[in-house]
Amino acid sequence: MSSQTSEPLGRVARRQQRNREALIRAASAVMSEKGVAAATMLEIAERADVGTGTVYNYFKSKDELAIAVLEELMHDLALRIEQAMQGFEDKAEVYAFGIRTVLETAISDQRWKQLLYRSEVIADALFRVMGPYAINDMQRATAAGRFQVDDPALVWRLTAHAIVGIGLAITTDAVPLASVEAIVVRLLCMTGIGADLAVELAQRPRPALPA
């Protein structure tokens, strides 16, 4: 009796998970093509092959769906950064590549840059989703004597908020795009590495990011 009761619930849960994933994929595609503002819930529902009302069973608003899309983008970006830096022994270099890549993505990807005005929400998402990767790199760089970080979670939280804030400033032309390298150097300085070493890290050749 117990197994008969739980099986339908399992199917329901799997269907709900498939619907949610389909909606996020569809929203990601539509928002990438048209931007967040121009995307409509109707178009997203049609792309996901679900009823328009179904969207609201999973997401209260387009804004909430856009944030879910962004969290998926962040997770995928973290994995791509990890893949690109395989074989690099210097975790300080891995971390430097990571923060530059995150900043450049934040100011260039339509799905991301149009949400930068939601600074607190987006910075929190960045802290949560990419934090495990960034914090691990900081810890390993500190253990190797490259960084001097007593509280990597705090440093990453400060960095996440800085990336989102400066990303918004760049996309609104308050800060020139040409400042990206100088910004990366200042973010690296939060690890205690020192300005000269931060400049050297920021200027190293970077591997291609996997598609």
Image (tube, rainbow, N blue to C red):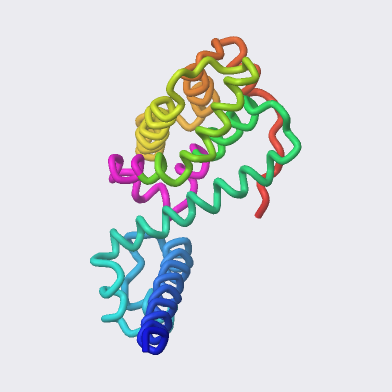
Q: In the image, residue 69 lies at what x, y percent?
A: 42, 59
State left or right for residue 90 relative to residue 58: right
Above or below: residue 25 compared with residue 164: below
Could you tell me how many numbered marks the image carries?
0
Name the image quarter holding residue 171.
Answer: top left
x 40%, y 47%: residue: 113
Would residue 118 be counted in the magenta stretch? yes
Q: In the image, residue 107 lies at what x, y percent?
A: 46, 42
State left or right for residue 82 relative to residue 88: left
x 38%, y 82%: residue: 6
Segment tinted magenta in the rendering:
103-124
State left or right for residue 37 relative to residue 177: left
Image quadrant occupied by the C terminus: bottom right
Above or below: residue 112 compared with residue 166: below
Q: In the image, residue 170 lies at what x, y percent?
A: 41, 35
x 64%, y 28%: residue: 91
Above or below: residue 126 compared with residue 9: above
Would residue 87 be counted in the magenta stretch? no
Above or below: residue 38 compared with residue 179: below
Q: In the image, residue 155 lies at what x, y percent?
A: 42, 25
Q: Quick one: 152 or 51, which is closer to the camera?
A: 152
